[in-house]
């Protein structure tokens, strides 16, 4: 972020702020996530930055700001394929899950399926692939449909060359563990928890999502 700002690459800096905010949000650091998303929006109102910021706010519990940014994206980019078939469905589905309406989220993401494994060159870094899959997995978890949730998280693990180093690559192991738990498959759940915890064996111990994972795993022992 600092390097991009020194070279006056505002859009690049804003993207870094948004992506770092998304990481914080996914890991449970909501306050810091919202701060970074706000800094991103101060630097750019670009399509990809706005999507990243909206997703941050959705994961960080600021549904009002997420909804406002989602509505603005829909208004500004009515014929943009990436917006219409990736960004908007993902945001709307995440907001539906937050409202406790998992079935609406699953329905919202149906039209994304033909495109969700694609990695775009239109976006600055192509980081956005597979987020629709991750949110769908979360929606199935919320709907207590363990088998369907497991299939979505496994899809992420099966396409590591697409997800690269995005945080959902690690969190897919945790999602899979929770999905197996819903199905009553304790052995597979333990294996997936162990894979996640092994990946994060050197992580800061106070990361909220890590503490949750450890507590969930301990209940299976």
Image (cartoon, rainbow, N blue to C red):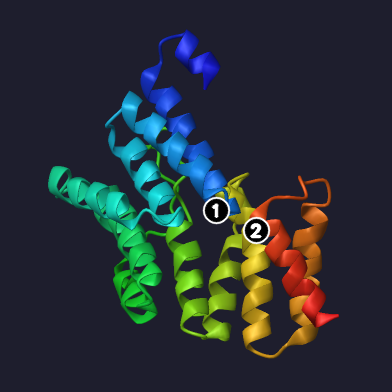
Q: Secondary structure at mark 2?
A: helix
- The reply to whether residue 221 is visible in this rendering is yes
Where does residue 190 sit, x and y in percent of width and height? Answer: 79, 76
Q: Which mark is residue 106?
A: none
Residue 38 versus residue 18: which sits nearer the camera? 38
Q: Residues within 10 Å of mark 2 (few under 14, many from 20)?
A: some
Where does residue 155 sit, x and y in percent of width and height? Answer: 57, 66
Check if mark 2's residue and mark 1's residue have beta carbons within 8 Å. yes
Q: Which mark is residue 26?
A: 1
Q: Which residue is mark 2?
A: 209
Residue furthest bottom in the image:
184
Q: State the separation of the CA atoms marked 2 and 1.
A: 8 Å
Figure quadrant of residue 96: bottom left
Where does residue 76 sit, x and y in percent of width and height? Answer: 15, 42
- Going from N to C along the chain, the mark reached first, 2 or 1, is 1
Residue 117 versus residue 11: which sits nearer the camera? 11
Residue drawn where x is 79% and y is 60% of the image? 197
Residue drawn where x is 71% and y is 57% of the image? 210
Answer above or below: position of 37 versus 132: above
Figure quadrant of residue 67: bottom left
Residue drawn where x is 61% and y is 46% of the image? 164
Q: Secondary structure at mark 1?
A: helix
Residue 204 versus residue 77: which sits nearer the camera? 204
Answer above or below: position of 1 versus 208: above
Residue furthest top in the image:
7
Answer above or below: position of 48 versus 180: above
């Amino acid at each position: 972020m600092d390097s991009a700002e020194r070279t006056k690459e505002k859009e690049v800096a804003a993207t870094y702020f948004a992506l770092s905010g998304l990481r914080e949000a996914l890991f449970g650091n909501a306050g810091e996530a919202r701060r970074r998303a706000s800094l991103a929006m101060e630097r750019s109102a670009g399509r990809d930055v706005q999507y990243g910021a909206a997703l941050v706010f959705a994961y960080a519990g600021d549904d009002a700001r997420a909804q406002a940014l989602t509505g603005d994206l829909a208004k500004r980019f009515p014929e943009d394929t990436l917006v219409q078939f990736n960004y908007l469905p993902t945001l709307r589905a995440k907001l539906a899950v937050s409202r406790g309406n998992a079935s609406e989220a699953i329905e919202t993401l149906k039209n994304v399926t033909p495109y969700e494994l694609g990695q775009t060159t239109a976006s600055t870094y192509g980081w956005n692939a597979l987020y629709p899959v991750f949110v769908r997995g979360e929606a199935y978890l919320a709907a207590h449909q363990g088998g369907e949730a497991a299939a979505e998280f496994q899809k992420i693990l099966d396409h590591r060359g697409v997800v690269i180093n995005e945080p959902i690559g690690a969190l897919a192991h945790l999602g899979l563990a929770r999905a197996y738990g819903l199905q009553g498959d304790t052995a597979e759940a333990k294996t997936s928890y162990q894979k996640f915890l092994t990946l994060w064996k050197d992580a800061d111990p106070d990361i909220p999502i890590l503490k949750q994972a450890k507590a969930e795993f301990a209940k299976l022992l």
